[in-house]
Image (cartoon, grey):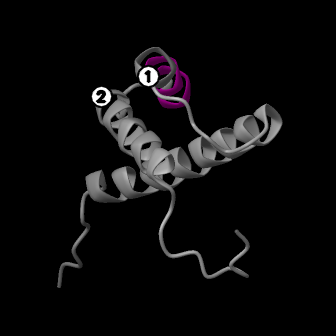
Amino acid sequence: MKTRGFLTHPSRPICVYIKELESCFKKHADSINVFDDTIDELLQNINFKLQLGCAEHKSNVMTAIYEHYIKMRMRQYLYAKKPRNKKTK
């Protein structure tokens, strides 16, 4: 349903997909090929059918979620690992 940008709760299959994506990301966060390793494991482990209508939209939505989520998590992960440089007087 269209919500005019005020979506507050994603569908249950999307939540399951994101939880599985987070699990895979945690395993491969320090990998050189985070994107590739994460998606490979995600596609091997995922055992549900995302019900979003036609296959074209399903593929587009899953790809968009994956790309945006991994980019966001990598920013958070690297920011958390970054050593804090304190000013010395």
| Numbered range of the magenta stretch | 34-41
Please provide percent x and percent y for residue 74. Answer: 45, 48
Is 34 located above or below residue 4 in the figure?
A: above
* Quarter where residue 85 is shown: bottom left
- The residue nearer to you, when weighing 62 against 80, is 62
Q: CA distance from mark 2 to mark 1?
A: 18 Å
Name the N-terminal-most of marks 2 and 1.
Answer: 2
Within-10-Å neighbours for mark 2: few <14, some 14–19, many 20+ = few
Asked if the magenta segment contains residue 36, the reply would be yes
- Amino acid type, callout 1: Asn
Q: Residue at (47%, 28%) from the top-left corner? A: 48
Q: Is residue 83 left or right of residue 50?
A: left
Residue 27 numbered mark, or none = 2
Asked if the magenta segment contains residue 7, the reply would be no
- The residue nearer to you, when weighing 88 against 68, is 68
Q: Residue at (79%, 38%) from the top-left corner? A: 54
Q: Residue at (44%, 24%) from the top-left corner? A: 46
Residue 47 numbered mark, or none = 1
